[in-house]
């Protein structure tokens, strides 16, 4: 095994152990340990933050407005280029978002459910 690979493995193990130790210390202090489903809003994905912002707005918004609202509502600074890239990938997959104009994004309308059919 090369020294570079060995160091990468050891760093990974050290990071995992450090996270476990922090969780144990929080539990000893009586604080709830963070789990994936209860992570604070500051640790939410950029895409989920944008989805919440657009749902709240009820209309498409320019990327600059989205970034401003993410900062004021969630206290999170979003990187413009990576956010546009992530949204563009979702749009190409027809997943949640649409582009209404240059750098303006909205939520994809949900499909109406036909009578007699259950929503999936």
Image: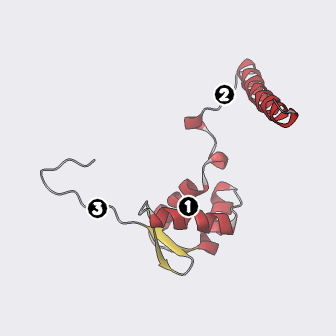
Secondary structure at numbered mark 3: loop
- Residue sitting farthest toward the front: 1
Q: Position of residue 79 (x, y in %)?
A: 70, 64
Number of residues whose C-alpha sits closer than 10 Å to that of mark 2, classed few (under 14), some (14–19) or many (20 or more): some
Of residue 100 and residue 71, the one placed in the foreground of this image is 100
What residue is disc 1 on?
A: 50
Question: What is the CA distance from the residue labelled 2 to the residue labelled 3?
Answer: 38 Å
Task: Kindly report the distance in space between the C-alpha atoms of the residues bearing marks 2 and 1.
Answer: 26 Å
Q: Position of residue 13 (x, y in %)?
A: 77, 27
Rendering quarter of residue 7: top right
Identified at 65% across, 67% down, the residue is: 67
The residue labelled by disc 2 is 33
Residue 68's disc is none
Q: Is residue 56 left or right of residue 114?
A: right
Q: Earlier in the sequence, mark 2 or mark 1?
A: 2
> Residue 80: image x %, image y %?
67, 68
Q: Which residue is mark 3?
A: 111
Q: Is residue 68 left or right of residue 5?
A: left
């Amino acid at each position: 095994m090369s020294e570079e690979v060995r160091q990468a493995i050891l760093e990974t193990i050290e990071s995992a152990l450090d996270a476990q130790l922090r969780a144990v210390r929080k539990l000893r202090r009586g604080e709830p340990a963070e789990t994936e489903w209860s992570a604070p809003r500051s640790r939410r994905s950029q895409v989920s933050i944008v989805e919440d912002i657009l749902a709240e707005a009820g209309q498409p918004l320019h990327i600059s407005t989205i970034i401003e609202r993410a900062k004021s509502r969630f206290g999170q600074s979003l990187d413009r280029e990576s956010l546009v890239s992530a949204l563009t990938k979702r749009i190409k997959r027809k997943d949640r978002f649409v582009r209404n104009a240059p750098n303006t994004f909205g939520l994809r309308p949900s499909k109406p459910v036909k009578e007699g059919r259950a929503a999936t």
